[in-house]
Amino acid sequence: MRLLLAALVLGVLSAQSSIALAASAGKEFRWQVMSAARDRVIETQTVDYGNPVVNSTECIWDIDDNLSFVGTGNIGPRQTVSFERCLIADNAYHLWGMAVGTPRRADYRATLSFSTGHTIELSNRGCMVGPIYDLVFSGLQPIPDSNGGVGKLVTVTWSITNLNKQTLHNVMVSGKLYFSTAEVIQTWCPGASTSGDLDCVYDPNVCWATDM
């Protein structure tokens, strides 16, 4: 009887393990926005609040805009998964953050990149401030339907690539955007593997990374 019970228990455990592995194997990587806020009035460019500069786009722009998202699931061999958002860059200091978690040691490449030509690579956590532009330079373009606003359209991309020959299971990536302050940087990026500014103040066509 004991042998029969043991065999039944082992059979149940084996079935549960097979179900769990099958569920894990079929867990497609998905992104989900947890919270997002986008102000219509652009504070840094508004002089008269009776006639404000406004954001009529779907892009991040105002200094108080914020975003939080997560990505979870499996990543196949040599596969890259990415999440993008557009930014109208001006003189606002936006802080971009990224963190990666895996249930075991894994070989992957995680990056936070900007269409200005800059990419930071991180081991498991990192952040970047910018791009930052001075409003007095003529290289910034008028933003349609903004009532006189100017900026540079930038694409921000969070990516992770599985460098293994096997599927990487149960990966979690989190990303954030918020107004950059010393307090926020300490909260989000303590011991961050990479951090710095994308400083575009002196030439709106050229940015360069500087250490914080």
Image: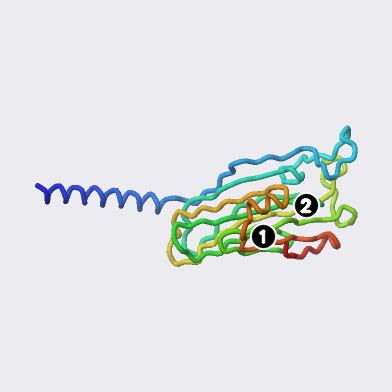
The mark nearer the N terminus, 2 or 1, is 2
Write down the quadrant of residue 51 in the picture. top right
**Whole-percent x and y of residue 38?**
71, 40
Looking at the image, which is closer to me, 196 or 38? 196
Q: Residue furthest left?
A: 1
**Whole-percent x and y of residue 198?**
75, 60
Residue highlighted by disc 2: 89
Asked whether the beta carbons under mark 2 and mark 1 sit within 8 Å of each other, the answer is no
Give the residue displayed 29% in from the left and 48% down from the top. Answer: 16
Tell me the quadrant of the picture where the C terminus can be found: bottom right
Give SS at disc 2. Answer: strand
Residue type indicated by callout 1: Ser
Give SS at disc 1. Answer: strand
**Whole-percent x and y of residue 54?**
81, 39
Left or right: 47 as drawn, with respect to 175: right
Q: How many marks?
A: 2
Left or right: 28 as drawn, with respect to 192: left
Give the residue displayed 18% in from the left and 48% down from the top. Answer: 8
Give the residue displayed 85% in from the left and 54% down from the top. Answer: 140
**Whole-percent x and y of residue 93?**
76, 52
Neighbourhood count class around disc 1 (C-alpha, 10 Å): few under 14, some 14–19, many 20 upward = some
> How far apart are the alpha carbons under marks 2 and 1?
14 Å
Residue type indicated by callout 2: Ala
Neighbourhood count class around disc 2 (C-alpha, 10 Å): few under 14, some 14–19, many 20 upward = many
Left or right: 74 as drawn, with respect to 7: right
Residue highlighted by disc 1: 113
